[in-house]
């Protein structure tokens, strides 16, 4: 399927991802997106019949079951890497005292 990458599509994608681009950046974005779609098209031509799907990126499988004796490492809190409330909120585009403010996504109706 051939998708036309134009300024209108880039504007739509920018809106969906809440990004802003300068008009001078649009041609480079068009070129980049066209190349990415070209790579995806090239991948679709590869014969994958009989190839096992990749489930894990390593040979180590961490299955949470009674028979499994190998477990993933425990998460550890490293105090010097913790952010204060103020540090965590310093780059928030919108905040309300101690909280991030985000646009309403879901309505209460089903």
Image (tube, helix red, strand yellow):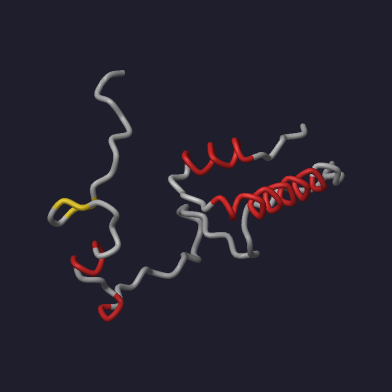
Q: Position of residue 86 (x, y in %)?
A: 19, 67
Instruction: Judge by depth and name the residue closer to the eye, 91 or 39.
Output: 91
Query: Which quadrant of the structure image shows residue 8?
Result: top right
- For this view, does 48 lie left or right of residue 14? right
Q: Residue at x 43, y 45 (%)?
A: 18
Q: Residue at x 71, y 51 (%)?
A: 31
Q: Residue furthest front?
A: 24
Q: Position of residue 65 (x, y in %)?
A: 47, 52
51 is higher (above) or lower (below) than 2: below
Instruction: Judge by depth and name the residue closer to the eye, 91 or 77.
Output: 91
Q: Position of residue 25 (x, y in %)?
A: 59, 55
- For this view, does 40 lie left or right of residue 109? right
Query: Which quadrant of the structure image shows residue 2?
Result: top right
Q: Residue furthest left?
A: 97
3 is higher (above) or lower (below) than 82: above
Q: Residue at x 63, y 61 (%)?
A: 57
> Quadrant of the image for the N terminus?
top right
> Quadrant of the image for the C terminus?
top left
- For this view, does 99 lie left or right of residue 36? left
- Total labels: the figure holds 0
Q: Residue furthest bottom?
A: 80
104 is higher (above) or lower (below) than 61: above
């Amino acid at each position: 399927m051939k998708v036309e990458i134009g300024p209108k599509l880039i504007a739509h994608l920018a809106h969906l991802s809440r990004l802003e681009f300068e008009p001078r950046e649009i041609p480079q974005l068009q070129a980049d997106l066209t190349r990415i779609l070209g790579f995806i098209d090239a991948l679709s031509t590869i014969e994958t019949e009989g190839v096992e799907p990749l489930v894990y990126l390593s040979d180590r499988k961490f299955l949470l079951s009674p028979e499994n004796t190998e477990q993933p490492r425990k998460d550890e809190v490293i105090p010097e890497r913790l952010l204060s409330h103020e540090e965590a909120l310093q780059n928030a585009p919108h905040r309300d005292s101690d909280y991030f403010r985000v646009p309403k996504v879901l309505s209460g109706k089903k």
